[in-house]
Image (cartoon, rainbow, N blue to C red):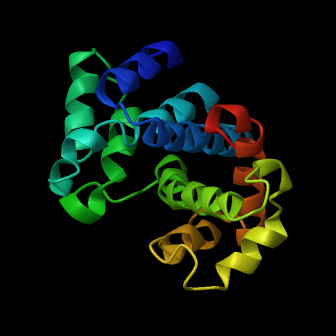
Amino acid sequence: MTRKKALDLLHKNMESPNLRRHCYAVEAAMKALARRFGEDIEKWGIVGLLHDGDYEKTRETPEKHTLMMAEWLKKAKVTDKEILDAILSHNYAHTGQNPPKNRLEWSLYCCDELTGFIVAVALVRPDKKLSTVTVESVLKKWEQKAFAAGVKREQIEECEGRLGIPLPDFIDISLKAMQGIAKDLGL
């Protein structure tokens, strides 16, 4: 699957500009992580781009989240098991199936929540720009449990044990990736 086809599939099934931006942010972080690990950048990016592609249609039935996207991908003749498994692993907490088992899947698991946290940090800055967010400013907010209270910090912190990347480095990788597409994120 090409990025263009993945983007078409995303836009066909997701109308919310903010949800689309979230998918773009995860795509950017996943590409940066693929670079770090010497993995397939396009494949990892597609996984990041499509991981929440069915969210608008499954919001009320979280147990169906990712299952619908996997079906859409199969209908689009995507047979790449790594892509399908990674998409499915994203929602194992609700489906009870496909827990993350490799770097691709753990990268998605960890960076998904982090991108939202970084956006929250940017939005409380006076200029609301990613360009002025630093790893230090993210870590300062990290300690404030009331800040972005819905973000599962423990999920992000799995980066250390599962990926061998210290939290500050993981934040740095994701932040720089997001800063690189700040215009697309509206930040």
Residue at the location (61% across, 66% down)?
Answer: 159
Placement of 31 over or under 153, stated as above or below: above
In this view, the residue in front, 99 or 69, is 69
Q: Position of residue 99 (x, y in %)?
A: 33, 59
Q: Position of residue 77 (x, y in %)?
A: 27, 15
Quadrant for the N terminus in the image:
top left
Viewed as shown, does residue 33 lie left or right of 16?
Answer: right
Placement of 167 over or under 127, stated as above or below: below
Placement of 163 over or under 105, stated as above or below: below
In this view, the residue in front, 76 or 150, is 150
Viewed as shown, does residue 155 lie left or right of 39?
Answer: left
Quadrant for the C terminus in the image:
top right
Where, by quadrant of the figure, is residue 158 drawn?
bottom right
Viewed as shown, does residue 48 lie left or right of 25?
Answer: left
Q: Position of residue 34 (x, y in %)?
A: 65, 40
Residue at the location (37% across, 43% down)?
Answer: 52
Placement of 164 over or under 4, stated as above or below: below
Residue at the location (30% across, 27% down)?
Answer: 13
In this view, the residue in front, 166 or 172, is 172
